[in-house]
Image (cartoon, grey):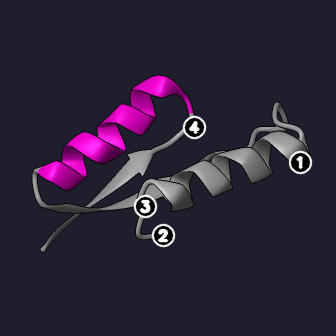
Amino acid sequence: MKKVVLAYSGGLDTTYCVKYLGDLGYEVHAVLVDTGGFSQEELNFVEKRANSIGVAS
């Protein structure tokens, strides 16, 4: 299986990209760069969403 790293924000566009890439046969690994603009609640939400849609790591 091919692997890809995706800059993932948890929003609609990058969530769609996870599903699309998965449908193309990629194992998707998500990265979120926290530059201080996210609350802990937002970070938890993004992680939970990523896990729920099949992000590998």
Work out whether mark 3 precedes mark 4 in sequence or the reverse, and give the earlier one. Answer: 4
Indicate the secondary structure of the residue bearing disc 3. loop
Residue 9's place in the image compared with 51, above or below, is: above
Q: Which residue is mark 1?
A: 40
At a point 15% along the width and 50% down the height, the residue shown is: 23
What amino acid does circle 2 point to? Ser
Left or right of 3: which side holds 6?
A: right
**Cα–Cα gap, marks 1 and 2:** 19 Å
Label total for image: 4
Q: Which residue is mark 4?
A: 10
Give the x, y percent position of residue 46: 66, 46
Asked if the residue under mark 3 is in contact with the one under mark 1, i.e. CB atoms within 8 Å, the reply is: no
**Cα–Cα gap, marks 4 and 2:** 14 Å
Left or right of 22: which side holds 38?
A: right
Is disc 3 surrounded by few (<14), some (14 to 19) or many (20+) residues within 10 Å? many
**Cα–Cα gap, marks 4 and 1:** 14 Å
Is disc 1 surrounded by few (<14), some (14 to 19) or many (20+) residues within 10 Å? few
Give the x, y percent position of residue 24: 10, 51
Q: Which residue is mark 3?
A: 55
* Segment colored magenta: 11-23
Is disc 2 surrounded by few (<14), some (14 to 19) or many (20+) residues within 10 Å? few
Q: Which residue is mark 2?
A: 57
Q: Quadrant of the N terminus?
A: bottom left
Asked if the residue under mark 2 is in contact with the one under mark 3, i.e. CB atoms within 8 Å, the reply is: yes
